[in-house]
Image (spheres, grey):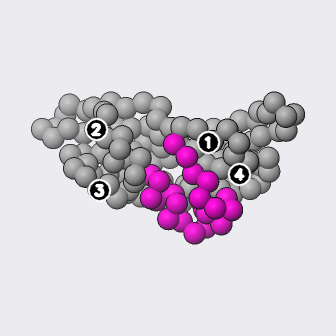
Amino acid sequence: MSSIIPELNTALYTTLSGSTALTTALGGTSIYFQQAPESKEVPFVIWSYQSSFQENIELSPLHQVIVYIRCYDTNPARAGTVDNIIDGLIDGKTLSLSGSWVNYWSAREEDIVLVEEAPSQVTIHSIGAYYRINLDK
């Protein structure tokens, strides 16, 4: 699994940051792996890995990776708009990986909508989804 992460991180960041619609909605390239900087104000996008497993049904290694991609914002409508943009970039699409792995299929699997209260008493909306990213070597 560890050899997939650098390639997939690059592909995800390149896909997300390369979208003018997404960077406009965020007011810049506020796209981070695992965690935004502590002082970063919303809106921003974070992706993280939820699970990964190798399918042993073919001679070449097949991997399925579940990635959680979400937008954090105080404005739920804008967070929903960002989520829709991300969905258009990932669901049913293939990511371009630069190394030995090939993404042959990606799919949105589960919507996740959360509301949290930040320590500053500000309500933060997190809207996103799990995406299954299928890889072959």
Sooner in the amino-acid sequence: mark 2 or mark 1:
2
- Left or right of 19 on screen, residue 104: left
Give the magenta part as a residue range.
12-33
Sooner in the amino-acid sequence: mark 3 or mark 4:
4
- Left or right of 53 on screen, residue 80: right
Element type where label 4 sits in the image: loop
Which disc number belongs to residue 75? Answer: none
Which disc number belongs to residue 36? Answer: 1
Q: Is residue 23 above or below residue 123?
A: below
Q: Where is residue 113, by image quadrant?
A: top right
Q: What amino acid does circle 4 point to? A: Pro
Q: Which residue is mark 2?
A: 3
Image x and y of residue 70, in percent: 61, 44
- Left or right of 131 on screen, residue 57: left
| Closer-to-camera residue (10/55) | 10
Q: Which residue is mark 3?
A: 98
Q: Nearer the viewer, mark 1 or mark 3?
A: 1
Q: Is residue 113 above or below residue 20?
A: above
State the residue at coordinates (45%, 48%): 107
Q: How far is mark 4 from mark 1, CA to CA?
A: 10 Å
Q: Which residue is mark 4?
A: 43
The N terminus lies in quadrant: top left
Element type where label 3 sits in the image: loop
